[in-house]
Image (spheres, coloured by chain):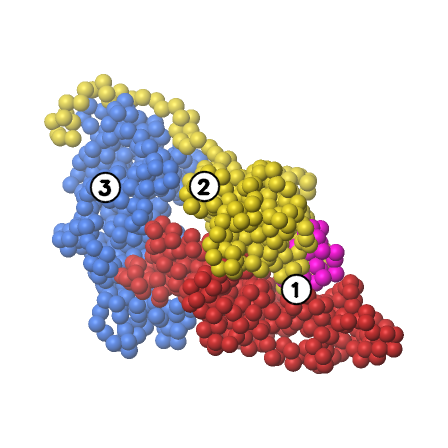
Chain colours: A blue, B yellow, C red
């Protein structure tokens, strides 16, 4: 499979009043052509920062790449000049933001905002750009696009604004589309529409999507692969099925257990205890150990490397080390694992041959 | 870490441990109160800190300055009129050595007039010591500013607070009044008031306070309205808290910051208006000195004795800058999101 | 948080739309459900203007009344050399100026004349009407005020932008310091110093008076412009910094816009709109400043006239000028508020955030 974007050992820090905040502490992942990679994690886990650093949208005065590279088209994005980056942004890689209410310029007509990347990156006339713009708006499902071209953002609803933002992002047929929690600020019904739209569009324009979210329900709906982030690191990565039905990292277990579900209505919802790690002084060893009931001695001393589970599935937990004791994941997780071919709880009764 | 190393990790390291879940709930940062946090932020603001030091120095000088060199600010020694500055020690450097202009020539006026005393900042046309008068004037200007600001705060907070907290009819009537008053330019009302009152300290303070409180009352009202509707106040009310408790425990602490910030900007405005009024002749009457009257006197003889204007001009400018910088610093520290 | 909202029910198509409109912190805020159009907004503006006009009238009425009665309590006599006149002469003079009649009658006559725009007759300048007096002096004041306002604001905007774009650099500190000086140093101190150094010592420009055409206006204009310059520089800096950190600027960057486009196309307009709200205070500052600055530079303008009429107890002129200034400032603030509503295409969807 063609790798379109590769992030290798990325480390990034913010310089703040209080000191250096190590927001990303060695993140590596690949994005394949045409796939949707979901990055999940709680607030502050570094998922948004990772994607913003791909776009180089973090304030240069306070953020600093400490290590690693972001390879795109053979270029390391961390090393490009501002001018070179401007040619990539909006053209090769574009982005959709969380809050559609604030991500459009309130004093500019939406037509102008849609046309801007077209005029910027493609050598076309204004009339042509307008045609393309209207076509885009139509594609994302804005009815009566010609007439609404001259309207201002406040004249659109939240869902419509997010559609417009998507249209802007798609204006130059980007190779990579980064969606930073694009549905979080929307009503549930609108969320579903936007997700449908994105899936629909991905088929049409064949772009790769990085989808950031903390909502596992959304992940199951859109993603091909999932990366789970915690404390500035990716702790587990795999296909959707692997993450949902054969999770290995205690944090992933926690995330999945805290997801409300219809068929497991019997007991109270699980909540992961504690708070995310303080990235100002990140803990030595496994950042999640302090909140985990599966902590090992070594978790306090050394950060776990990525252990391979399958060709597509990796997890950073000492539990996967050959010397580690066998532990039983939470009950709900075992239930899940029972249905996954290849997991140690897989029940043949369900018709498999493991 | 390489593969071999991974393999060699001793098994005992993989013992399970129990984490005290309370330690997971511990808060990693020391918790700071709002004011501690604000002070921390303010301390980082060098300009504000320097301004505070300067301001304290100026206040100290305003208090002890008039008694430093043994001259009396109202004592008129006509023989010593119009002397340029002469400071012991510094005079040897060729500045402040008593040299002034007489008939277009540079001469040492102290020698000509046979004056043995030192007048650090020179004397005015009546032979009064300008150093003493400068600090007396600073004292008066600061007094006016502080009193006017205090009155603004009291009236403004009460008016805005009552209007915002009780709302409804009361608010309606009170706001109608404010809406009419706010249309009246401050300048106009201040000048009119001074015309009908006996000129002097009280008149200036009243004139400045007369419109000053309106801005404060509007800010306080807006803040009260903002917080009154918020959940924590509703929650407190649901739990049966009295008006007094809600105001004292919930509303006041939240709007304290904005009141302080606004006061810090009221003070320089008052200093300015006092000086302005004195400059156009509506302020303090002689022999009382304020920074404004000193600037006014100095301006009249600017051609020949520029230092006469310069010293009060510098003091008033430094005062205003210091107050503005402290206000800015406080605003950033107390309420980073607040704008002008 | 609605500040005395009035509710409007408007029929659009066959739907009834409800919106609230109120005046808050000098900003017109219109609150209503999404998907309204400009038509509705204009309806509100008409009502808003009506309300404002009523208040303007009330304020002016109050000022006129207050001015009249305050003047009556003034110590000293309005007529020069009053003491030298004998009984009959006094009676003649009093009759001529209408001050022999009872106060309420004087008041009624005064208000009636005022309604016709007649500000009365000067007590000091024999037989000259206050209207003529003001008219003969309006030109220099207007030129100075306009120059100070226009140049001060423009330079201030540029300075503020520079500071915001180069935040925390020497440019920022430099222009911020300059702005602090401008806000802090009283205009008459600045004017005196300018006059002393530039005119008296270096002989670059005229010391005062209005005889050298444009040259005469330079120094007083600079002295008056410092306030607006500093105020707008500070204001634009704060606004710009906030705008620059907003989501739509990030989106503009994500589109590939360069620094110049972001500063001027996206950020400036949004930062300028709120600047309009401080134009009122700025104008008031210029009027205040003109009193002293015109006196210092001996400019034959209204400010100088006002100060000298205070010195000579010229009641009619004081009253007339006071009313003139009040009307001017009230009108400017009204225009400014209207302008704010007109140039901001965004309609606040909810006041809840304020």
Q: Residue furthest left?
A: B4
On screen, residue A86 above or below C148: above
The earlier-in-sequence mark between 2 and 1 is 2
Which residue is drawn at the image coordinates 71% and 56% (left, top)? B199
Q: Confirm whether residue A315 shows in the render.
A: yes
The count of marks equals 3
Q: Confirm whether residue C341 shows in the render.
A: no
Q: Where residue A330 sits in the image (x, y, percent)?
A: 34, 31
* Range of residues picked out in magenta: B187-208
Which residue is drawn at the image coordinates 34% and 70% (left, top)? A112
Which residue is drawn at the image coordinates 29% and 62% (left, top)? C257
Q: Where residue B95 sits in the image (x, y, percent)?
A: 44, 46
Chain at tag 3: A
In the displayed structure image, the side of residue C196 where residue B142 appears, left or right: right
For disc 1, the neighbor class at 10 Å (few under 14, some 14 to 19, many from 20) is: some
Q: Nearer the viewer, mark 3 or mark 1?
A: 1
Q: Which mark is residue C345?
A: none
Q: Which mark is residue A66?
A: 3
On screen, residue C323 above or below B332: below
Q: Where residue A72 sits in the image (x, y, percent)?
A: 17, 53
Q: Which residue is mark 1?
A: B188
């Amino acid at each position: 499979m063609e790798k379109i974007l590769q992030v290798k050992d990325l480390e990034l820090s913010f310089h703040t009043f209080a000191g250096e905040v190590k927001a990303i502490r060695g993140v590596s992942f690949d994005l394949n052509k045409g796939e949707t990679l979901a990055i999940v994690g709680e607030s502050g886990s570094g998922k948004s920062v990772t994607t913003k650093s791909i776009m180089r949208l973090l304030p240069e005065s306070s953020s600093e790449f400490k290590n690693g590279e972001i390879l795109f088209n053979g270029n390391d994005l961390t090393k490009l000049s501002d001018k070179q980056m401007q040619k990539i942004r909006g053209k090769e890689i574009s982005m959709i933001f969380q809050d559609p209410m604030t991500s459009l310029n309130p004093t500019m007509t939406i037509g102008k905002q849609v046309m801007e990347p077209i005029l910027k990156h493609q050598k076309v006339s204004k009339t042509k750009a307008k045609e393309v713009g209207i076509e885009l708006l139509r594609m994302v499902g804005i009815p009566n696009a010609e007439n609404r071209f001259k309207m201002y953002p406040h004249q659109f609803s939240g869902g419509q604004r997010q559609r417009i933002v998507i249209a802007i992002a798609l204006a130059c047929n980007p190779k990579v589309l980064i969606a930073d929690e694009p549905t979080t600020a929307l009503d549930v019904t609108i969320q579903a529409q936007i997700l449908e739209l994105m899936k629909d569009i991905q088929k049409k324009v064949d772009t790769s999507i990085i989808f950031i979210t903390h909502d596992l329900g959304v992940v199951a709906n859109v993603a091909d692969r999932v990366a789970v982030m915690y404390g500035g690191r990716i702790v587990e990565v795999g296909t959707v099925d692997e993450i949902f039905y054969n999770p290995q990292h205690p944090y992933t277990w926690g995330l999945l257990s805290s997801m409300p579900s219809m068929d497991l209505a019997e007991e109270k919802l699980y909540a992961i205890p504690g708070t995310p790690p303080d990235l100002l002084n990140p803990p030595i060893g496994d950042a999640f150990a302090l909140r985990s009931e599966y902590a090992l001695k070594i978790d306090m001393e050394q950060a776990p490397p990525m252990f391979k589970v399958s060709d597509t599935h990796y997890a950073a937990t000492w539990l996967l080390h050959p010397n580690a004791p066998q532990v039983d994941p939470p009950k709900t997780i075992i239930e899940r694992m029972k249905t996954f071919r290849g997991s140690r709880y897989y029940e043949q009764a369900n018709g498999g041959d493991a | 870490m390489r593969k071999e190393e991974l393999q060699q990790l001793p098994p005992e390291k993989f013992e399970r441990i129990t984490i005290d879940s309370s330690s997971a709930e511990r808060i990693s940062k020391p918790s700071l109160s709002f004011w501690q946090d604000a002070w921390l932020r303010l301390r980082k603001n060098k300009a504000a800190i320097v301004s505070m030091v300067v301001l304290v120095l100026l206040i100290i000088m305003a208090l002890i300055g008039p008694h430093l060199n043994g001259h009396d600010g109202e004592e008129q020694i006509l023989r010593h009129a119009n002397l340029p500055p002469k400071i012991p020690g510094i005079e040897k450097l060729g500045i402040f050595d008593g040299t002034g202009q007489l008939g277009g020539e540079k001469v040492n006026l102290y020698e000509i007039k046979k004056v043995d005393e030192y007048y650090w900042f020179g004397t005015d046309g009546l032979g009064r010591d300008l150093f003493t008068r400068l600090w007396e004037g600073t004292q008066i200007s600061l007094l006016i500013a502080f009193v006017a600001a205090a009155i603004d705060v009291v009236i403004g907070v009460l008016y805005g607070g009552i209007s915002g907290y009780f709302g409804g009819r009361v608010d309606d009537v009170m706001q109608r009044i404010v809406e009419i008053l706010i249309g009246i330019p401050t300048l106009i009302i201040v000048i009119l008031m001074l015309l009908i009152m006996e000129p002097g300290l009280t008149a200036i303070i009243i004139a400045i306070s007369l419109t000053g409180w309106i801005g404060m009352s509007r800010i306080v009202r807006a803040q009260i309205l903002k917080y009154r509707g918020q959940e924590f106040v509703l929650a407190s009310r649901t739990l049966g808290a009295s008006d007094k408790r809600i105001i004292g425990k919930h509303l006041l602490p939240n709007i304290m910051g904005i009141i302080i910030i606004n006061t810090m900007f009221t003070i320089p405005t008052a200093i300015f208006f006092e000086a302005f009024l004195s400059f156009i002749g509506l302020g303090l009457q002689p022999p009382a000195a304020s920074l404004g009257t000193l600037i006014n006197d100095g301006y009249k003889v600017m051609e020949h004795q520029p230092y006469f204007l310069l010293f009060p001009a510098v003091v008033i400018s430094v005062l205003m800058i210091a107050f503005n910088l402290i206000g800015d610093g406080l605003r950033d520290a107390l309420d980073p999101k607040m704008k002008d | 948080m609605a500040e005395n909202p009035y509710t409007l029910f408007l029929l659009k198509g066959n739907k009834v739309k409800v919106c609230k409109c109120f005046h808050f912190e000098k900003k017109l805020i219109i609150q209503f459900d999404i998907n309204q159009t400009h038509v509705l907004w204009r309806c509100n503006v008409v009502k808003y203007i009506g309300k404002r006009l009523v208040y303007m009238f009330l304020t002016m009425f109050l000022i006129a009344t207050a001015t009249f009665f305050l003047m009556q309590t003034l110590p000293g006599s309005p007529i020069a050399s009053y003491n030298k006149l004998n009984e009959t002469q006094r009676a003649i003079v009093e009759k001529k100026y209408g001050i022999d009649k009872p106060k309420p009658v004087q008041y009624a006559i005064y208000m009636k004349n005022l309604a016709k725009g007649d500000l009365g007759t000067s007590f000091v300048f024999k037989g000259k009407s206050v209207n003529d007096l003001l008219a003969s002096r309006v030109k220099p004041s207007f030129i100075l005020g306009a120059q100070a306002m226009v140049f001060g604001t423009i330079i201030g905007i540029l300075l503020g932008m520079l500071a915001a774009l180069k935040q925390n650099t020497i440019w920022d500190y430099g222009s911020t310091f300059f702005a602090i000086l401008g806000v802090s140093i009283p205009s008459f101190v600045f004017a005196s110093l300018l006059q002393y150094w530039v005119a008296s010592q270096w002989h670059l420009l005229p010391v005062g008076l209005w005889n050298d055409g444009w040259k005469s206006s330079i120094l007083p204009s600079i002295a008056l412009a410092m306030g607006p310059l500093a105020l707008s520089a500070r204001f634009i800096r704060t606004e710009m910094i906030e705008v620059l950190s907003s989501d739509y600027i990030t989106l503009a960057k994500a589109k590939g816009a360069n620094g110049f486009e972001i500063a001027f196309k996206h950020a400036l307009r949004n930062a300028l709109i709120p600047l309009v709200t401080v134009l009122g205070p700025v104008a008031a500052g210029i009027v205040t400043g003109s009193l002293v600055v015109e006196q210092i530079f001996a400019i034959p303008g209204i400010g100088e006239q006002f100060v000298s009429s205070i010195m000579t107890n010229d009641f009619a002129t004081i009253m007339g000028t006071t009313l003139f200034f009040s009307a001017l400032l009230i009108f400017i603030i009204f225009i400014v508020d209207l302008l704010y509503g007109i140039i901001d295409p965004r309609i606040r969807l909810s006041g809840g955030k304020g």
